[in-house]
Amino acid sequence: MRDQVPGPASAALQAANAHSQLRQEDTPSSSSDVLYPVVSCSIFASSISSAAERVRAILQQEEVGDRKCPLLFIQLNELLSTPAGLEWKETARWIKFEEKVEDGGERWSMPHIPALPLHSLFELRTCLQKGTVLLDLDAHSVKEIIGTWETCHPTRTFLSMSFQLRNRFKKKLPPGAEVANVMVGEVDFLKKPFTVFVRLREVVALGSLTEVAFPSRFLFILLGPHAKVKAYHEIGRAMATLLTDELFQRVALQAKNQEDIIAGIDVFLDELTVLPPGKWDASARIPPPSCLPSPHKRYPGGRSWKSHCNGSTAAAEDRPGLGHPHFSEELERTGRLFGGLVRDIRRKAPWYRSDFSDALHIQCLSAVLYIYLATVTNAITFGGMLGDATANMQGVLESFLGTAFAGSIFCLFSGQPLTILSSTGPVLVFERLLFSFSEDYSLDYLEFRLWIGLWVAFFGLVLVATEASHLVQYFTRFTEEGFCALISLIFIYDSLKKMLSLAEAFPINWHYRTDDGCPPWPSDSGCPHPWPLSSCSLPASPQPPAAPAWLSRAQCLSRGGQLLGASCQYVPDIALLSFLLFGGTFLCCTALKHFKSSRYFPTGLRKLVSDFSIILAILIFCAIDVALGLETPKLLVPSELKPTNPTRGWIVLPFGANPWWVCLAAAVPAVLVTILIFMDQQITAVILNRKEYKLKKGAGFHLDLLCVSLLMIITSVTGLPWYVSATVISLAHMDSLRKESTTSAPGEQPEFLGIREQRLTGLAVFILTGVSVFMAPILKYVPMPVLYGVFLHMGVVALNSIQFTDRVRLLLMPAKHQPDLLYLRHVPLRRVHLFTFIQVLCLAVLWVLKSTVAAIIFPVMLLALVGIRKGLECIFSLHDLSWLDSIMPETGRKEAEGKLPRKHEKEESDTEEVGDVLGAVLFCCCCSHGCFGAEAEPGLGVQLRAAASAARRGR
């Protein structure tokens, strides 16, 4: 039987036979001899076990060496009996989750979290403790590892090399991945188990030992006599699962001896969670979670409060701890005039060349088309509203040219080129008020606006020189979410308002009937009542009809008649079709965007469809509109380069139309515009530069503000609209440039790698916007309802991206149905609702101010959000705010850090009080039950309290 075992099996069995003879006295004779480890987290031991101390020392050595931990592919091979003899067969594999070979051997199971018997882990620990552990073995083949040359048969291998090359599973592994081989089996000639764990000094390609052609690092072999059902199989699964744990893998890579390996197992057991056998189905396969905790949180001895986060497990390690506000390097004050601007330029200059080369990717093409259509729609929408508000002093053409010019300049020289400039709702409100004021007091609107723009540019330069962007640190999540929610709701509201206006322009005639007839005689009075159809005029006939009859529309037209009246050419389907295009585009955008997480089609195709989701949705519904042939409202682009209002020119003169004092009086409204521009620009910049976006090239708050200020001069002189960062479109731009890992383990979500930071997509978008004047024959086929659906999609996506939306949903959920969010574990629900209610109230006030005549103080209210957030510290504790929001920067760092020790001192005093109370309770209980007999000492309670204090000191 042994001679029939192919290649490495024979060598392994020969080595096992020799090893069993040498170590017969040291190996336990039965499973009853298994030594179970003392749990290192025992309440009778110190708070940090010796195993944890050893693991911590190992990991500290790893940090010094800066050795990366490669991804491991683990394959479990079992020695099974076949008609031809013993044969090694692959029964399971792991990358991060387990996949089993289903019955029949032709199908892999779905990836799942491995559920291990607790006994198998203890057996594995004993195997490694009593078996052979070879670390840094210098071997280059299976023969050298086993040490038996004569019995190896290289022609009898596990898998053919051609199968390895054809294996598509290799695409799931990133470059640099390594392999761990786990081999278990039962044999007749061994009386006691034979175990060996090998770590190779250098990774070695072991031929066709595994199904993927990657070099091997670890090898675990367990052979022994017949045991309980699947005992060796479960130990092999335990070893493979242990190797998938990143913490144990780091220990195994750095271990110096056998005790280090055992310490790694003990730390793994410390973190083990046991499920009771009667409370769940052991055969059930637990699906992989959508988010895994960071391994940095699991380092032994780590303080739990250092890694708490604002509701997101994935971002735990990036969040500052309680009392430790995060100070961005971009916002540190230099104390010199224009010091922050100089640092921004020095920071961004080395990346300038790569800002263009990094755009050479097909994903950027999708982003350009998507953002271009959104920008064109936004320019037409705001251009039309500006024309209505300013008597066409600024119209659609000025909006196109201003967007193209200001956006191109900003993308070329700004600190954050992913920002998209656009006209915004607050700026539009100010323009409307300014025009009304100019009409009321007989002032020239464009000249007055020119001086306001010059003053705003001056104030902006002063803010840049004095490093006022340092104040951005006070824009916490409370302020960011309030502003982002407002802009998102404006997008949603405007898209719905536009669709309702289409319904008014093309009303639905609910009494329309296609069978309505018309009299067979001419009528000049239009449609006779109560018929909705007009009369039909037939050609002159020498003989009238035999009898008076009403003709249907079809009969009327078939006899050469003519429909007369206003409603004769009425098409009742335009409004309905517009709403279908609107809703269909929104749903299609959402569905195609999430298509990459579906189970249909290959991964590459799903990702491609997701990247081009917006463009595909627009093309699909444009094709539907063309196929139906109804006259739905289309995108209209101006085709001539001339001002919308013929009374104005392209250059605004500073003097001549208004009194001389207007240039000085313009400084007053310029202050409000400066506040608005500063808040709008910097809040958007803060949102785009969040740490969760993993930007590599840094921000440029001072440089961005300088570009916007200088553009205010140019747009004011030329009479073009003012431009500032558009929050929703900028977020859509960022979302369209997300980078994700191309290789992911089965069951694992693709890892978010960051944003494709470059300048070319924004530059291409604004250049295309400028030349859209010459693309009118093509753009006229795009229905406006389709673009309004894209607007709705952008607003909903931006609104769902903030935590505020999740907390609003919690208001409508019973506590038992609420999701397991981290901040709900640490903050009482009523405090969460109170914080959300305050945010909703602030949002309602902002909306009312935006929509009424009080909109002139809207910029001041935006600034007041920072003051309101500061006042929340009187209502909420710093602990609650650290979970719901973030800690605002204090006057001194020591004051913020000083809050933690006081909290620990309070906890220590609380512990002492609990100890005293516990001692008294124990004394009373024992006395009441006669534990100490009738002669109990009256000072026993004091002794118990003293013992409790000694125990605290021991801990």
Image (cartoon, rainbow, N blue to C red):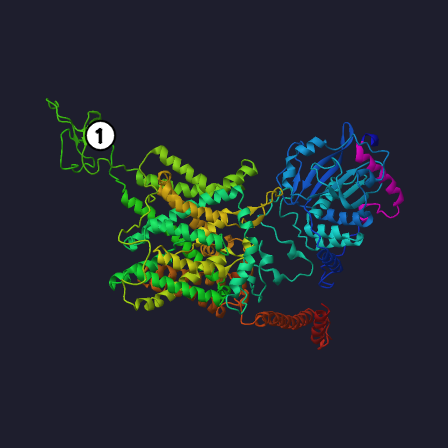
Q: Say which residue appears at 62% left-offset and 48% top-offset.
A: 279
Q: Quadrant of residue 437?
A: bottom left
| Rendering coords of residue 293 (x, y %) | 61, 53
Q: Is residue 819 above or below residue 747?
A: below
| Rendering coords of residue 944 (x, y %) | 71, 72
Q: Which residue is mark 1?
A: 553
Along the line of sight, the residue nearer the viewer: 484 or 451: 451
Along the line of sight, the residue nearer the viewer: 399 or 319: 399
Q: Secondary structure at mark 1?
A: helix
Residues shaded magenta:
5-33
| Quadrant of image for the N terminus | top right
Q: Is residue 776 above or below residue 904?
A: above
Chief SS of the magenta region: helix
Give the amino acid at mark 1.
Arg
Numbered label tally: 1
Along the line of sight, the residue nearer the viewer: 144 or 379: 379
Task: Tell me if residue 790 is in the magenta stretch.
Answer: no
Q: Say which residue appears at 25% left-offset and 61% top-offset.
A: 439
Question: Badge 1 local density, few (<14 within 10 Å), some, or many (20+)?
Answer: many
